Amino acid sequence: MKKYIASISMLTLCAAAMIAVPTLRADETNMGAADAPAKKSDKSDQVAYKGTVKAVDPAAETITVGDLTLKLAAEAKLTKDGQAMKFTDIKEGDEVRGHYKKTDDGKLEAISVHEGQAAHHKKKDGAAAE
């Protein structure tokens, strides 16, 4: 009887250990991730905008679209009808769209500025005409 109780006790301890070890490891992994600074996703913090350019400030490299004043990001993508353009090509009254993100200091930074039709829109229109 003592051997039977000892065997069941050992099996129970082994089963408990098999369940506890992965759980403890998962907690350690999660704690390490919580201690590390959170890495922001590139796309999740971007906000879309669309509107008419009210003002362009070449010195500050900002454009005002509606109520938004957007500073151009160093890596911003600028296109006109699907082709690359320069900041100096943006004029008051242009219809633009794109994405911006809020910087740590609360300013709005334009990630992209697109004017006219996008390249994939032109292809669809061209394909329909054929």
Image: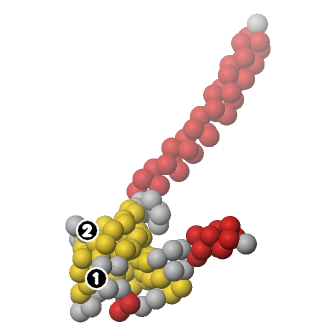
In the picture, the quarter occupied by the C terminus is: bottom right
Q: Which type of secondary structure does the marked residue at label 2 adopt?
A: loop
The mark that comes first in sequence, 2 or 1, is 2
Residue of label 2: 66
Circle 2/circle 1 CB separation < 8 Å:
no
Going 37% across and 74% down the picture, which residue do you hit? 95
In screen coordinates, is 75 left or right of 60? right
Q: In which quarter of the image is residue 57?
A: bottom left
Q: Which type of secondary structure does the marked residue at label 1 adopt?
A: loop
Single out the residue that lies furthest toward the front. Answer: 129
Q: How far apart are marks 2 and 1 (CA)?
A: 11 Å
| Three-letter code, disc 2 | Gly
In screen coordinates, is 19 left or right of 70? right
Q: Can residue 98 be seen in this view?
A: yes
In this view of the protein, which residue sits in the foreground, 9 or 58? 58
Q: In which quarter of the image is residue 100?
A: bottom left
Residue 118: horizontal and vertical position, in percent? 53, 74
Going 38% across and 62% down the picture, which residue do you hit? 47
Going 68% across and 71% down the picture, which residue do you hit? 129
Q: In which quarter of the image is residue 67?
A: bottom left
Residue of label 1: 92
Q: Residues within 10 Å of mark 1 (few under 14, many from 20)?
A: few
Residue 29: horizontal and vertical position, in percent? 53, 51
Residue 123: horizontal and vertical position, in percent? 65, 73
In this view of the protein, which residue sits in the foreground, 56 or 24? 56
In screen coordinates, is 73 left or right of 105? right
In the image, residue 128 sits, relative to residue 34, either above or below, namely below
Going 76% across and 7% down the picture, which residue do you hit? 1
